[in-house]
Image (spheres, helix red, strand yellow):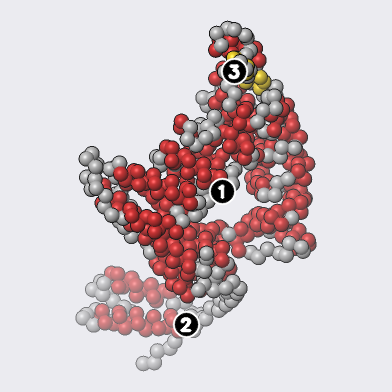
Amino acid sequence: MTRTSAPVDAPGADAWEGLVTTALLGTDRRTPPGTAPGPDAPLALLDAAAVETVRRRAGLRPARAAERPQAAPEDSRPALPPAAARRLALLLADRPGPSGGGRRGAAPDLTELLPQWLAVANARGFAPPPQVLPALLDAARGRTDLRPAALELAGPRALWLARLNPDWRFALRATPGGGAALPHLQDDDTVRQLWQEGLFAERVALLSALRSRTPAAARDLLATTWGTERAEDRLMFLDSLREGLGPDDEPFLEQTLADRSRNVRATAAELLSALPGSALAARMAVRAEACVAIDHMRSAQQQATEAGGDIPGRTTQPGGTTQTTATIAVEAPHECDPGMERDGVVAKAPAGRGERSWWFGQLVEAAPLGTWSRRLGGRTPREIVALPVADGWQGELHAAWCRAAVRQRDAAWSRALLGDPSAPEAGGPGAVSLAERAKLLGTLGAAERAEWVAGFIAAHGLSEAFQLLGVCAVPWAAPLGRAVVDALNIARDAGSYPWSFSGVMGLAERCLDPSEAARLDALLAVPDEPENASPGAGGYWAEAFQRLVTTLRLRAAMAEELGAA
């Protein structure tokens, strides 16, 4: 019997479905077509299924071939040195162990060294071997803190891979413009076309790139479409003006104070207040000056009390000289008028906060810090913050000055507000929290910052130094490194467990200059435990210092492999 093949277009679904139904029911209840019930029915079913499978496969029309993907772009950066490439593969192969418990062992944590390795490699401008790109993308997928540096090292080929693998699509979102090549910034027509027709991420990347090179051109480009942008987009675009902010930006920012969006208005006001010569800063100065003054009458009464009532307004000093002490008086605004709101003052105070103090703090924060020397008798910032403030307003006034010093990047005011690092609580007159101190330190140069934090640690130990250490340049300057090591040594001699200092120890592993490793060798031995020491604490400390020394030497080897000094 000759079997006739059905034409390609003939439907075969019914025959196949019939065989499937027979298999589900069983050949005792139903047999394949043309087969009698009996012991041969199961074999006949399998034969029929095999024939139908071949027929279905042979009858398929070939699908249209998919387009071949474009070739991966070239990476013109120099290749990693072989030793550095092997090191990268080892770092990427390492996986963090299970968390829990305070003991970490003496082996370095390679996952914590990977960010430093990436930073040095990117600074040197190297390109990774193509075979490690998947591992780099996987590492960036699992750790958001690694993404910027990992994607920078991975380069354009990683974005090419990300378009082929859905698991790596995050790289397209994390890269400005989704990896799209920006036009030549001197090509005005192409730049304008991308700005008008590009995706949001492409436009953000274009504006940022243009702002970093030609601030005025970026601002003018933004102005061409400002009125038609969505509020959330206007806010993002406006934020890009922080880079290269200057007096030429004032007219545009002044116009945005009338924007429909409150968040846009607030951002524009913040940017204008960072320009001490702006009209908004001048308006804020007038308002703030009306709230703050020297109260000579109060000062005279206080001095008379302190001097026993001899001469109101003066106190007698050794040698017969006299000194007048001033007091700052504060009269907070009684209302938030429309002009204040237009200039960025938020009228509604947060829960638990008084309205008048809320408005007052915003005015002082936005006023140029140069206002206060003129207003308060030509005094220096250090002399001003040393003045007593009447009626409990000191905390509010000094906290606002702290925010102004950070916003205006004023180092002189930051020094005055920080005070001496060895002072009680090392808070200075206005730094009421470690977070504020850290922000103030950020306005100082790297060397001065490290010196202040070293003084803080020498006077107060490490218990509150973690946030302050985080703003210091890496590697730590020698005085700061010595202060940290000395403080750790003192903590070890106290006999407590090292786990409460694990955060600082982790920072030391990443930030201490590798040249300090030799000086730490003396701390590797298990110390004699004092009488009241925690059991076994000395051994744990020796283990922690061993890990620190090993990590520092490994960092030195990594830098040498990358050709870094």
Image point (40%, 58%), residue name: 517
Mark earlier in primary sequence (1, 2): 2
Where is residue 46 drawn, in percent x and y?
A: 30, 80
Residue 125, placed above or below residue 59: above
* Furthest residue in direction front, as rendered: 319
Q: Nearer the viewer, mark 1 or mark 2?
A: 1
Q: CA distance from mark 2 to mark 3?
A: 115 Å
Tell me where residue 349 sits by quadrant: top right
SS of the residue under disc 2:
loop
Res. 446 mark: 1
The amino acid type, in three-letter code, at marker 3 is Gly
SS of the residue under disc 1:
helix
Image point (55%, 48%), residue name: 447
SS of the residue under disc 3:
loop
Where is residue 407 drawn, in percent x and y?
A: 63, 39
Where is residue 296 drawn, in percent x and y?
A: 66, 15
* Furthest residue in direction bottom, as rendered: 1
Viewed as shown, does residue 461 lie left or right of 340?
left
Q: Nearer the viewer, residue 441 or 383?
A: 383
Disc 2 target residue: 59
Q: Are marks 2 and 3 in contact (CB under 8 Å)?
A: no
Q: Residues within 10 Å of mark 1 (few under 14, many from 20)?
A: some
Where is residue 341 drawn, in percent x and y?
A: 68, 29
Mark earlier in primary sequence (2, 3): 2
Q: Nearer the viewer, mark 2 or mark 3?
A: 3
Disc 3 target residue: 319
Q: Nearer the viewer, mark 3 or mark 1?
A: 3
Q: Nearer the viewer, residue 305 or 176?
A: 305
Residue 393, placed above or below residue 137: above
Q: Residues within 10 Å of mark 2 (few under 14, many from 20)?
A: some
